[in-house]
Image (cartoon, grey):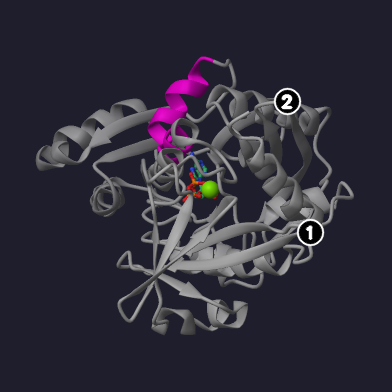
Protein backbone atom coordinates (compact mmCIF):
# COMPACT_ATOMS: atom_id res chain seq x y z
CA UNK A 1 0.00 0.00 0.00
CA UNK A 2 1.14 3.48 -0.80
CA UNK A 3 1.69 5.07 2.59
CA UNK A 4 0.71 8.69 3.07
CA UNK A 5 3.34 11.00 4.51
CA UNK A 6 2.23 12.97 7.55
CA UNK A 7 4.28 15.82 8.97
CA UNK A 8 3.71 15.93 12.71
CA UNK A 9 4.67 19.32 14.04
CA UNK A 10 5.15 19.85 17.77
CA UNK A 11 6.66 22.14 20.43
CA UNK A 12 6.14 25.68 19.29
CA UNK A 13 6.69 29.20 20.49
CA UNK A 14 4.03 29.25 23.19
CA UNK A 15 3.77 28.88 26.93
CA UNK A 16 2.34 25.42 26.24
CA UNK A 17 5.46 24.20 24.42
CA UNK A 18 6.15 21.39 26.83
CA UNK A 19 2.53 20.24 26.85
CA UNK A 20 2.63 20.09 23.06
CA UNK A 21 5.69 17.82 23.19
CA UNK A 22 3.86 15.48 25.57
CA UNK A 23 0.76 15.51 23.36
CA UNK A 24 2.75 14.93 20.17
CA UNK A 25 4.62 11.92 21.57
CA UNK A 26 1.26 10.31 22.37
CA UNK A 27 -0.22 11.16 18.97
CA UNK A 28 2.81 9.76 17.13
CA UNK A 29 2.64 6.53 19.14
CA UNK A 30 -0.93 6.09 17.89
CA UNK A 31 -0.22 6.63 14.19
CA UNK A 32 -0.58 3.41 12.22
CA UNK A 33 2.79 3.04 10.47
CA UNK A 34 1.43 0.56 7.97
CA UNK A 35 -0.81 3.30 6.66
CA UNK A 36 1.23 6.40 7.28
CA UNK A 37 4.85 7.48 7.18
CA UNK A 38 5.73 10.27 9.56
CA UNK A 39 8.06 13.22 9.34
CA UNK A 40 8.62 14.63 12.81
CA UNK A 41 9.34 18.34 13.10
CA UNK A 42 9.82 20.17 16.37
CA UNK A 43 9.64 23.92 16.76
CA UNK A 44 11.80 25.26 19.58
CA UNK A 45 10.59 27.98 21.93
CA UNK A 46 12.71 30.41 19.91
CA UNK A 47 10.96 29.28 16.72
CA UNK A 48 13.65 27.08 15.13
CA UNK A 49 12.27 24.17 13.08
CA UNK A 50 14.21 20.92 13.58
CA UNK A 51 13.64 17.46 12.15
CA UNK A 52 13.82 14.60 14.57
CA UNK A 53 13.59 10.85 14.15
CA UNK A 54 12.41 9.45 17.42
CA UNK A 55 9.57 9.80 19.88
CA UNK A 56 12.04 9.14 22.70
CA UNK A 57 13.92 12.28 21.71
CA UNK A 58 10.65 14.24 21.83
CA UNK A 59 9.93 12.92 25.31
CA UNK A 60 13.45 13.65 26.58
CA UNK A 61 13.90 16.98 24.80
CA UNK A 62 17.00 15.67 22.98
CA UNK A 63 15.39 16.58 19.62
CA UNK A 64 16.42 20.20 20.19
CA UNK A 65 20.05 19.27 19.48
CA UNK A 66 19.11 17.88 16.05
CA UNK A 67 21.24 19.02 13.13
CA UNK A 68 18.66 18.95 10.35
CA UNK A 69 16.62 22.11 9.88
CA UNK A 70 13.18 21.92 8.35
CA UNK A 71 11.38 24.53 6.27
CA UNK A 72 7.76 24.17 5.26
CA UNK A 73 7.61 25.63 1.80
CA UNK A 74 4.65 27.93 1.18
CA UNK A 75 4.85 26.97 -2.51
CA UNK A 76 1.55 25.26 -3.29
CA UNK A 77 3.00 23.46 -6.32
CA UNK A 78 5.53 21.68 -4.10
CA UNK A 79 3.57 20.71 -0.98
CA UNK A 80 6.85 19.90 0.63
CA UNK A 81 9.15 20.26 3.58
CA UNK A 82 12.73 21.19 2.75
CA UNK A 83 15.33 19.55 4.95
CA UNK A 84 18.60 21.43 5.28
CA UNK A 85 21.73 19.67 6.46
CA UNK A 86 25.33 20.83 5.98
CA UNK A 87 24.34 23.01 3.07
CA UNK A 88 22.40 20.22 1.33
CA UNK A 89 18.68 20.49 0.65
CA UNK A 90 16.35 17.49 0.48
CA UNK A 91 12.74 17.99 -0.52
CA UNK A 92 10.19 15.73 1.17
CA UNK A 93 6.67 15.78 -0.23
CA UNK A 94 3.95 15.52 2.38
CA UNK A 95 0.30 14.52 2.11
CA UNK A 96 -0.93 16.18 5.30
CA UNK A 97 0.27 17.99 8.38
CA UNK A 98 -0.76 17.33 11.97
CA UNK A 99 0.07 20.42 14.01
CA UNK A 100 0.02 19.07 17.56
CA UNK A 101 0.63 22.58 18.81
CA UNK A 102 -1.12 24.33 21.66
CA UNK A 103 -1.43 28.05 22.19
CA UNK A 104 0.00 30.98 20.29
CA UNK A 105 1.60 30.36 16.88
CA UNK A 106 0.11 26.90 16.73
CA UNK A 107 -3.51 26.91 17.74
CA UNK A 108 -4.28 30.48 16.73
CA UNK A 109 -4.45 30.33 12.94
CA UNK A 110 -0.89 31.39 12.20
CA UNK A 111 0.54 28.02 11.19
CA UNK A 112 -2.82 27.13 9.65
CA UNK A 113 -2.29 30.12 7.34
CA UNK A 114 1.02 28.64 6.23
CA UNK A 115 -0.65 25.29 5.41
CA UNK A 116 -3.37 27.12 3.48
CA UNK A 117 -0.78 28.94 1.38
CA UNK A 118 0.94 25.66 0.65
CA UNK A 119 -2.46 23.94 0.05
CA UNK A 120 -1.35 21.15 2.36
CA UNK A 121 -4.26 19.40 4.10
CA UNK A 122 -3.95 19.65 7.88
CA UNK A 123 -5.64 18.29 10.95
CA UNK A 124 -7.94 20.59 12.83
CA UNK A 125 -9.52 23.98 12.61
CA UNK A 126 -8.76 26.51 9.90
CA UNK A 127 -7.46 30.04 10.22
CA UNK A 128 -10.67 31.72 11.32
CA UNK A 129 -11.88 29.11 13.81
CA UNK A 130 -8.41 28.83 15.31
CA UNK A 131 -7.99 32.58 15.66
CA UNK A 132 -11.42 33.13 17.20
CA UNK A 133 -11.13 30.22 19.58
CA UNK A 134 -7.68 31.27 20.77
CA UNK A 135 -9.00 34.70 21.60
CA UNK A 136 -11.31 34.48 24.59
CA UNK A 137 -12.82 37.93 24.00
CA UNK A 138 -13.77 37.20 20.39
CA UNK A 139 -15.08 33.76 21.31
CA UNK A 140 -17.37 35.48 23.81
CA UNK A 141 -18.58 37.90 21.17
CA UNK A 142 -19.51 34.99 18.88
CA UNK A 143 -21.09 32.90 21.64
CA UNK A 144 -23.14 35.86 22.92
CA UNK A 145 -25.31 35.44 19.83
CA UNK A 146 -26.06 31.77 20.45
CA UNK A 147 -28.12 32.25 23.58
CA UNK A 148 -25.73 30.04 25.53
CA UNK A 149 -24.90 31.46 28.93
CA UNK A 150 -21.32 32.44 29.67
CA UNK A 151 -19.69 34.34 32.54
CA UNK A 152 -20.39 38.08 32.35
CA UNK A 153 -17.20 39.81 31.22
CA UNK A 154 -15.53 43.16 30.97
CA UNK A 155 -12.72 43.68 28.47
CA UNK A 156 -9.72 45.70 29.65
CA UNK A 157 -6.88 46.83 27.40
CA UNK A 158 -3.26 46.96 28.56
CA UNK A 159 -2.94 50.68 27.90
CA UNK A 160 -5.87 51.37 30.21
CA UNK A 161 -3.83 50.08 33.14
CA UNK A 162 -1.95 53.37 33.24
CA UNK A 163 -5.10 54.69 34.91
CA UNK A 164 -5.41 51.67 37.17
CA UNK A 165 -7.83 53.21 39.63
CA UNK A 166 -10.37 53.96 36.90
CA UNK A 167 -10.15 50.38 35.75
CA UNK A 168 -10.59 48.86 39.19
CA UNK A 169 -13.52 51.19 39.94
CA UNK A 170 -15.16 50.18 36.67
CA UNK A 171 -14.78 46.51 37.52
CA UNK A 172 -15.93 46.93 41.10
CA UNK A 173 -18.97 48.78 39.76
CA UNK A 174 -19.91 45.71 37.73
CA UNK A 175 -18.82 42.71 39.74
CA UNK A 176 -18.49 41.62 43.34
CA UNK A 177 -15.26 39.84 44.29
CA UNK A 178 -13.98 37.31 43.55
CA UNK A 179 -13.44 37.84 39.83
CA UNK A 180 -11.37 35.93 37.30
CA UNK A 181 -8.77 37.81 35.30
CA UNK A 182 -7.29 36.31 32.15
CA UNK A 183 -5.35 37.28 29.09
CA UNK A 184 -7.60 37.05 26.04
CA UNK A 185 -4.98 35.12 24.07
CA UNK A 186 -3.24 32.55 26.20
CA UNK A 187 -3.78 29.00 27.34
CA UNK A 188 -3.09 26.34 29.92
CA UNK A 189 -4.16 28.80 32.61
CA UNK A 190 -1.06 30.96 32.06
CA UNK A 191 -1.77 34.42 33.40
CA UNK A 192 -5.21 33.39 34.73
CA UNK A 193 -5.85 34.54 38.29
CA UNK A 194 -8.67 34.72 40.76
CA UNK A 195 -8.80 38.10 42.53
CA UNK A 196 -10.50 38.40 45.91
CA UNK A 197 -9.89 42.11 46.48
CA UNK A 198 -8.58 45.28 44.85
CA UNK A 199 -4.90 44.58 45.50
CA UNK A 200 -5.23 41.13 43.94
CA UNK A 201 -7.20 42.57 41.03
CA UNK A 202 -4.44 45.09 40.26
CA UNK A 203 -1.83 42.38 40.47
CA UNK A 204 -3.86 40.02 38.29
CA UNK A 205 -4.45 42.70 35.66
CA UNK A 206 -0.73 43.45 35.48
CA UNK A 207 0.11 39.79 35.17
CA UNK A 208 -2.49 39.20 32.45
CA UNK A 209 -1.10 42.22 30.60
CA UNK A 210 2.26 40.44 30.36
CA UNK A 211 0.58 37.83 28.16
CA UNK A 212 -1.72 39.92 26.00
CA UNK A 213 -2.89 43.43 25.25
CA UNK A 214 -6.49 42.31 25.70
CA UNK A 215 -7.59 41.20 29.15
CA UNK A 216 -10.89 39.75 30.31
CA UNK A 217 -12.32 40.21 33.76
CA UNK A 218 -15.14 37.78 34.49
CA UNK A 219 -17.66 37.10 37.20
CA UNK A 220 -16.66 33.99 39.14
CA UNK A 221 -18.84 31.01 38.33
CA UNK A 222 -19.50 28.43 41.00
CA UNK A 223 -19.92 25.16 39.23
CA UNK A 224 -18.35 21.90 38.20
CA UNK A 225 -15.95 21.91 35.24
CA UNK A 226 -17.43 19.82 32.47
CA UNK A 227 -15.85 19.24 29.06
CA UNK A 228 -17.04 17.79 25.80
CA UNK A 229 -15.12 16.56 22.75
CA UNK A 230 -16.27 17.43 19.25
CA UNK A 231 -15.30 15.84 15.93
CA UNK A 232 -16.34 16.58 12.36
CA UNK A 233 -17.15 19.56 10.19
CA UNK A 234 -16.97 20.23 6.49
CA UNK A 235 -18.53 17.29 4.65
CA UNK A 236 -18.68 15.32 7.91
CA UNK A 237 -21.48 15.71 10.46
CA UNK A 238 -20.36 17.39 13.70
CA UNK A 239 -20.52 14.90 16.56
CA UNK A 240 -20.10 15.37 20.30
CA UNK A 241 -18.74 12.76 22.68
CA UNK A 242 -20.12 12.22 26.13
CA UNK A 243 -18.99 14.66 28.80
CA UNK A 244 -16.15 14.56 31.29
CA UNK A 245 -15.43 16.30 34.55
CA UNK A 246 -12.26 17.91 35.84
CA UNK A 247 -11.65 17.44 39.54
CA UNK A 248 -8.92 20.01 40.10
CA UNK A 249 -6.63 19.52 43.06
CA UNK A 250 -6.39 23.27 43.59
CA UNK A 251 -8.62 26.27 44.15
CA UNK A 252 -9.01 26.37 40.38
CA UNK A 253 -7.57 24.47 37.44
CA UNK A 254 -4.27 26.34 37.14
CA UNK A 255 -1.18 25.28 35.17
CA UNK A 256 0.34 23.23 37.98
CA UNK A 257 -2.95 21.53 38.75
CA UNK A 258 -3.38 20.73 35.06
CA UNK A 259 -0.13 19.02 34.31
CA UNK A 260 1.92 18.41 37.44
CA UNK A 261 -0.48 17.77 40.30
CA UNK A 262 -1.20 14.09 40.39
CA UNK A 263 -4.20 14.70 42.61
CA UNK A 264 -6.05 16.38 39.73
CA UNK A 265 -8.38 13.86 38.20
CA UNK A 266 -10.68 13.58 35.26
CA UNK A 267 -13.73 11.37 35.05
CA UNK A 268 -15.93 10.54 32.09
CA UNK A 269 -19.72 10.44 32.20
CA UNK A 270 -20.12 12.02 35.63
CA UNK A 271 -23.54 12.17 37.24
CA UNK A 272 -25.06 15.56 36.34
CA UNK A 273 -28.42 17.10 37.25
CA UNK A 274 -31.30 16.36 34.86
CA UNK A 275 -30.41 16.52 31.18
CA UNK A 276 -27.38 18.80 31.73
CA UNK A 277 -25.02 16.38 29.95
CA UNK A 278 -27.16 16.45 26.81
CA UNK A 279 -27.39 20.25 26.96
CA UNK A 280 -23.58 20.43 27.25
CA UNK A 281 -23.27 18.21 24.15
CA UNK A 282 -25.67 20.31 22.12
CA UNK A 283 -24.01 23.55 23.24
CA UNK A 284 -20.58 22.13 22.35
CA UNK A 285 -21.77 21.41 18.81
CA UNK A 286 -23.35 24.88 18.50
CA UNK A 287 -20.20 26.65 19.64
CA UNK A 288 -18.03 24.54 17.32
CA UNK A 289 -20.24 25.39 14.36
CA UNK A 290 -20.48 29.06 15.33
CA UNK A 291 -16.71 29.50 15.24
CA UNK A 292 -16.60 27.59 11.91
CA UNK A 293 -14.81 24.64 13.49
CA UNK A 294 -13.24 21.84 11.46
CA UNK A 295 -11.80 18.59 12.69
CA UNK A 296 -11.75 18.71 16.42
CA UNK A 297 -12.19 20.79 19.52
CA UNK A 298 -12.76 20.37 23.21
CA UNK A 299 -15.46 22.67 24.49
CA UNK A 300 -15.38 23.53 28.19
CA UNK A 301 -18.28 24.46 30.44
CA UNK A 302 -19.32 24.97 34.02
CA UNK A 303 -22.42 23.19 35.26
CA UNK A 304 -24.02 24.66 38.35
CA UNK A 305 -25.68 22.72 41.14
CA UNK A 306 -29.05 23.64 39.64
CA UNK A 307 -28.00 22.16 36.28
CA UNK A 308 -27.35 25.41 34.45
CA UNK A 309 -24.84 25.04 31.60
CA UNK A 310 -22.34 27.90 31.26
CA UNK A 311 -19.86 27.98 28.39
CA UNK A 312 -16.24 28.71 29.35
CA UNK A 313 -13.94 28.21 26.38
CA UNK A 314 -13.17 26.20 23.26
CA UNK A 315 -9.77 24.63 22.52
CA UNK A 316 -9.15 23.80 18.89
CA UNK A 317 -6.09 21.63 19.51
CA UNK A 318 -6.90 20.03 22.83
CA UNK A 319 -4.25 18.17 24.80
CA UNK A 320 -3.42 14.60 23.88
CA UNK A 321 -1.31 13.78 26.93
CA UNK A 322 -1.77 10.60 28.94
CA UNK A 323 -4.32 12.37 31.16
CA UNK A 324 -6.00 14.48 28.47
CA UNK A 325 -9.75 14.61 28.23
CA UNK A 326 -10.20 14.74 24.44
CA UNK A 327 -8.97 11.22 23.64
CA UNK A 328 -10.41 9.89 26.90
CA UNK A 329 -13.91 11.08 26.01
CA UNK A 330 -13.81 9.25 22.68
CA UNK A 331 -12.38 6.13 24.30
CA UNK A 332 -15.39 6.17 26.60
CA UNK A 333 -17.48 5.98 23.41
CA UNK A 334 -15.54 3.00 22.11
CA UNK A 335 -13.17 4.90 19.79
CA UNK A 336 -9.58 3.97 20.54
CA UNK A 337 -6.78 6.53 20.44
CA UNK A 338 -5.34 5.02 17.27
CA UNK A 339 -8.73 5.04 15.54
CA UNK A 340 -9.24 8.64 16.63
CA UNK A 341 -5.87 9.73 15.24
CA UNK A 342 -6.68 7.93 11.98
CA UNK A 343 -10.10 9.63 11.82
CA UNK A 344 -8.46 13.03 12.31
CA UNK A 345 -5.91 12.42 9.55
CA UNK A 346 -8.54 11.09 7.16
CA UNK A 347 -10.73 14.09 7.90
CA UNK A 348 -7.79 16.41 7.22
CA UNK A 349 -7.41 14.85 3.77
CA UNK A 350 -10.98 15.91 2.93
CA UNK A 351 -10.20 19.49 3.77
CA UNK A 352 -10.17 20.99 0.29
CA UNK A 353 -13.06 18.95 -1.09
N1 LIG B 1 -15.29 32.87 35.29
C1 LIG B 1 -14.76 31.85 35.96
N2 LIG B 1 -15.32 31.39 37.10
C2 LIG B 1 -14.77 30.35 37.79
N3 LIG B 1 -13.62 29.74 37.44
C3 LIG B 1 -13.00 30.16 36.34
C4 LIG B 1 -13.53 31.22 35.53
N4 LIG B 1 -12.71 31.41 34.50
C5 LIG B 1 -11.70 30.52 34.64
N5 LIG B 1 -11.85 29.76 35.73
C6 LIG B 1 -10.91 28.72 36.22
O1 LIG B 1 -9.64 28.95 35.64
C7 LIG B 1 -9.25 27.85 34.77
C8 LIG B 1 -8.52 28.38 33.56
O2 LIG B 1 -9.31 29.31 32.87
P1 LIG B 1 -9.68 29.15 31.34
O3 LIG B 1 -10.60 30.26 30.96
O4 LIG B 1 -10.18 27.78 31.08
O5 LIG B 1 -8.28 29.42 30.63
P2 LIG B 1 -7.22 28.47 29.92
O6 LIG B 1 -7.33 28.77 28.46
O7 LIG B 1 -5.92 28.95 30.44
O8 LIG B 1 -7.55 27.05 30.23
C9 LIG B 1 -10.58 27.14 34.48
O9 LIG B 1 -10.36 25.79 34.16
C10 LIG B 1 -11.33 27.33 35.79
O10 LIG B 1 -10.82 26.43 36.78
MG1 LIG C 1 -9.35 26.08 30.16
The picture places residue 119, in percent across and down from the top left corner, at 48, 39
* Of 348 and 277, the residue lying toward us: 348
| Pointer 2 local density, CA inside 10 Å: few below 14, some 14–19, many at least 20 | some
Residue ID for mark 2: 282
The residue under the point 57% across, 23% down is 149
Considering the whole magenta stretch, tell me its main secondary structure: helix
The residue under the point 49% across, 67% down is 41
The picture places residue 319, in percent across and down from the top left corner, at 60, 56
Residue 264 visible to the viewer:
no
Q: Does residue 109 belong to the magenta stretch?
A: no
The furthest residue to the left: 162
Is residue 272 shown above or below 197? above
The picture places residue 254, in percent across and down from the top left corner, at 50, 59
Give whichever of discs 1 and 2 has the lower sequence position: 2
Quarter of the image for residue 173 reads top left
* Mark 2 CB within 8 Å of ligand 2: no
Question: Which is more foreground, mark 1 or mark 2?
Answer: 1
* Of 97 and 273, the residue lying toward us: 97
What segment carries the magenta color? 130-145
Q: Does residue 209 appear left or right of residue 26 in this picture?
A: left
Residue ID for mark 1: 338
Quarter of the image for residue 15 reads bottom left
Secondary structure beneath label 2:
helix
Where's the C terminus, which quadrant?
top right
* Of 119 and 223, the residue lying toward us: 119
* Mark 1 CB within 8 Å of ligand 2: no
Q: Does residue 276 appear left or right of residue 55 in this picture?
A: right
Q: CA distance from mark 1 to mark 2?
A: 26 Å
Secondary structure beneath label 1:
helix
Q: Does residue 135 belong to the magenta stretch?
A: yes
The picture places residue 233, in percent across and down from the top left corner, at 66, 29
Q: Which mark is residue 320?
A: none
Amino acid sequence: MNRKKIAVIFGGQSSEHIVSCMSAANVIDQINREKYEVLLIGITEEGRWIKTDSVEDIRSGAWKAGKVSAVLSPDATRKAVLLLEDGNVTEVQIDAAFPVLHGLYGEDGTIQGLFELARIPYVGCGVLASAISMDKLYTKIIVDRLGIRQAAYEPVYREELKAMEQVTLRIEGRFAYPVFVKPSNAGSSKGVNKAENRAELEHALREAACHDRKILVEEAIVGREIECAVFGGGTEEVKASGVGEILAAADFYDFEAKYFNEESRTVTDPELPGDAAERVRQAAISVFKAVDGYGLARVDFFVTEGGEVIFNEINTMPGFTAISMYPMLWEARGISKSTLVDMLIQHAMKRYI
